[in-house]
Image (cartoon, rainbow, N blue to C red):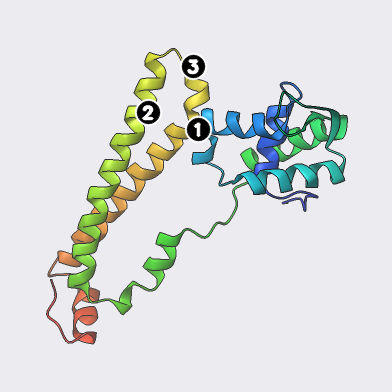
Amino acid sequence: MTTKRKVGNLLGLAVLSYLSQRPMHPYELSRMLRDNGDDRSIKFTHGSLYMVVQQLVRAGFITARETNREGQRPERTVYALTDPGRAELRDWLHELVEQPRHEYPQFVAALSLIGALPPSDVSALLRRRLDRLAARRAEIRAVVDGALAQGVPGLFLVEEDYRLALLEAESAFVERLLDRITDPETDWVRLWADFHGRSAP
């Protein structure tokens, strides 16, 4: 059963995770999130990060430890993880790893409405999608290979492996769908084309 959390934004989970290493200020958290490629998994801006930090403070998961200033720079508040925050991090990760969650991918939404386009258009669009999926797989493979060559342990690249698996599964699905659309023996494609007043592709 999914828990209703005091802070539900996944950016909050990332903040808790980084603060479990050591206290930091939001600017440092932002830099680490970007340097470690977490912005590929969790969407955030400078403003949203500060907002989540304040939510975590109000929830009692992190606390302001000190405020300091370097030269002419603005004051920076360093935040530390609390014991309840450490428990929340552990519990939240347990839930996300263990429990599949229904999500709403945009491609699934497009597939549910795809009959609004004629099959000949859909065939051309899907072929272009396959090209883009192949390019994205190549890009991620290059990221993984480059990181491994620099000595990054595979454990810290597991989300990229997952992205590759999803892209490979999607590519296989799109190829099967294209085969069905272009197969003259597929009855539903004829009906689909007739609906749009066109011949089957």
Q: Earlier in the sequence, mark 1 or mark 3?
A: 1
Query: Above or below — where is 76 with respect to 120?
Result: above
Q: Earlier in the sequence, mark 2 or mark 1?
A: 1
Residue 153, label in figure:
3
In the image: residue 6, left or right of residue 137: right
Query: Above or below — where is 146 with respect to 159?
Result: above
Mark 2, Cα crowd under 10 Å, few <14 / some 14-19 / many 20+, is some
- What residue is shown at x 17% (from left), y 87% (from top)? 197
Q: Check contact, mark 1 vs mark 3: CB within 8 A.
A: no
- What residue is shown at x 87% (from left), y 40% (from top)? 60
Residue that sits furthest to the top in the current view:
151
- What residue is shown at x 31% (from left), y 38% (from top)? 137
Quarter holding residue 24: top right
Residue type (three-letter) at the residue carrying disc 3? Pro
Q: Total of numbered circles in the picture?
A: 3
Residue type (three-letter) at the residue carrying disc 2? Val
> How far apart are labels 2 and 3 at the CA level?
13 Å
Residue bearing the label numbered 2: 143
In the image: residue 14, left or right of residue 165: right
Q: Check contact, mark 2 vs mark 1: CB within 8 A.
A: yes
Q: Nearer the viewer, residue 112 or 30?
A: 30
In the image: residue 120, left or right of residue 23: left
- What residue is shown at x 26% (from left), y 60% (from top)? 177
Quarter holding residue 199: bottom left
Residue type (three-letter) at the residue carrying disc 1? Gly
Q: Considering the numbered disc 3 on the image, is that residue within a helix, a strand or a loop? A: loop
> How far apart are labels 1 and 3 at the CA level?
15 Å
Residue bearing the label numbered 1: 37
> How far apart are labels 2 and 1 at the CA level?
10 Å
Residue 10 seen in the current view: no
Where residue 31 sits in the image (x, y, percent)? Answer: 59, 30
